[in-house]
Amino acid sequence: MELKDVILSTLAEMEDEHIIEKHTSGVIEKKESFAAKPVQKTVEQNYDENEEDEDEQLSNNSEVKYLSSIRERLLVLFEGFQAPNNTNIEAKVDMTLNFLEYVLATIDSRVEMLEKGNKK
C-alpha cells in the first residue's frame, strides 16, 4: 500500500468518525467541519511533488556515480601515461583515443536521456 493510499484512507476514517460522532450526539448535520476534498487534493499535489523530488534525487545520484566513475578512469589513464615505462606509446595513444570516444558516446546518451526526461 502506497503512502498516498494510507493517507487517503486515514482521512476517510477521520471523516467517518466525525459524522458518526455528530449522529450519536443527536445532532444530525450534514455540515463538514472538515473539507475532505480540498485536503485530498492537497495530499495528491504534495505526493506528486514528492515523486518529482525523488526522481530528481535519483537522477542526481546517478549523475554523481557516473561522474565519479569517469573521474576514476581518467586518473588511471593519466597515471598510465606518467609511468616511467613509456614504451609502446602508440598503443597508449590508441587506447586513450578509444576511451575518449567511449566517454563522448556515453555523455551524448546521458544528455539525450536528460533532455527526454525534461520534456515530459
Image: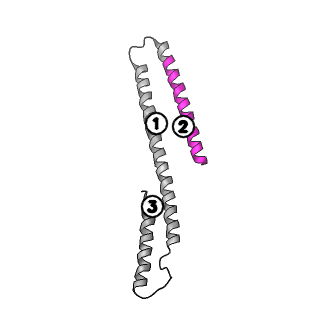
Is disc 1 placed on a helix, strand or loop? helix
Q: In which quarter of the image is residue 5?
A: bottom left
> CA–CA distance between discs 1 and 3?
35 Å
Q: Mark 3 points at which residue?
A: 5
Depth check, mark 1 against mark 3: the one in front is 3
Question: Which residue is painted at 47% across and 86% down in the image?
Answer: 28
Is disc 3 placed on a helix, strand or loop? helix
> CA–CA distance between discs 2 and 3?
34 Å
- Where does the image place residue 43, in percent across and percent down from the top left? 48, 64
- Where does the image place residue 1, in percent across and percent down from the top left? 42, 57
- Where does the image place residue 81, in percent across and percent down from the top left? 43, 20
Residue kind at label 1, given as amino acid type: Tyr
How many numbered marks does the figure carry? 3
Q: Which of marks 2 and 3 is nearer the N terminus?
A: 3
Question: Which residue is painted at 42% across and 78% down in the image?
Answer: 18
Residue kind at label 2, given as amino acid type: Arg
Comparing 68 with 40, the one in front is 40
Question: Which residue is painted at 50% across and 57% down in the image?
Answer: 49
Task: Count residues near mark 3 (Cα–Cα under 10 Å), then give few for <14, some for 14-19, many for 20+.
Answer: few
In the image, is residue 91 above or below residue 17?
above
Comparing 60 with 87, the one in front is 60
User: Do the residues bearing badges 2 and 1 touch, measured as CB atoms within 8 Å?
Assistant: yes
Q: What stretch is highlighted in magenta?
A: 93-120
